[in-house]
Image: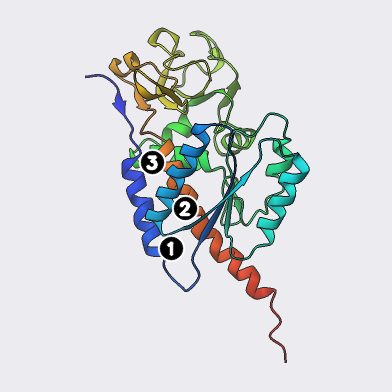
Amino acid sequence: MGASLLYGDPVVKDIERWCLRKGRRGAIEPVLAVLFFNTDTAAEDYVRIKAHVAAKAGVGYWVYEMSPKATSSQVQAQVRELNQNNHIHGILIQRPLPEHLNEPKIMGTIDTEKHIEQYCGGERSDIAADALSRLLAKYGRRRDLYQSTIHIVGFGNIITDNFVSHMKRQYPWVSVSPNLPGKTDDTKGADREAVLVSELHRGPGYIRTDMIPQGTRTIIDFGFYSTEKDGIVGDVDHTVFEEDGLAIAPTPGGVLPILLWLMMERTIRARRLVTKAEWHGCCVCQ
């Protein structure tokens, strides 16, 4: 029988319908500005993928390319310009950033109304945590996040400090580690089932069946590798898919497609906040 695979397509279709219904209302086109550093072909490919989704969602897509040698001050100055442009409603800084840049300071420069990765409708909400929650809810498994120990392992473009903070605020039992917990680790919560959320950067298919923590029933794979042999793969080895009793959000096809569409949904939601603030800033007195 094997594992149940949790694909993001049903969630993507819901978001796409919402975007098409809401995005074209009114005379103002929602616009997402993407700031990126052309460090390799993968960065260019990801910009093009987002452009394709934006076109389907009816969202304007403005790309701002910066030199990988730019300083943190230069990047912050560019972000401030985007903040002040009332035609732009959402801002996304494509990661990974060049290593010499101060990522927390740069990300903190984005206005909260336009910061679609960390806010939604002006409220603090990590986009990856939102995507994870929506996926599990679609499959009737969102309660797993409240009833299970959530093991967050690794760190990167998706598992960020903001993601971890969101998960700890929202759910009662969250552990965070750079490594997989051992089979007998966390004996304090051994009576609970476990959700494993992974972005390990240990190589494609690193997680094998004998490495899965005790009690794990759900695996969320945020790993992403482009290989010549197997194409796009994640942290989880495909032999794990043969295990009965598991539910796996795989790479490709799990949470990651939802992230792309949430960028568009959040830009459309941000349009209302930005345009509302613009109107409030206008003096109509004669």
Q: Earlier in the sequence, mark 2 or mark 3?
A: 3
User: Above or below — where is 230 with respect to 70?
Assistant: above
- Residue type at mark 1 is Gly
Q: Are marks 1 and 2 in contact (CB under 8 Å)?
A: yes
- Residue type at mark 3 is Ala
Q: Point out residue 65 in the picture as x, y percentages from the top left corner.
A: 60, 45
The structure's colour scheme is: rainbow
Q: Earlier in the sequence, mark 3 or mark 1?
A: 1
Q: Is residue 278 left or right of residue 53?
A: right
Give the alpha-carbon distance from disc 2 to disc 3, as whole Å: 20 Å
The residue that appears at 60% across and 53% down in the rendered structure is: 123
Residue that label 2 marks: 264
Can you tell which quarter of the image residue 86 is in? bottom right
Q: Is residue 48 left or right of residue 16?
A: right
Q: Which mark is residue 23?
A: 1
Residue that label 3 marks: 137
Q: Point out residue 275 in the picture as x, y percentages from the top left corner.
A: 59, 69
- Single out the mark in the foreground, 2 or 3: 2
Q: Residues within 10 Å of mark 3 (few under 14, many from 20)?
A: some
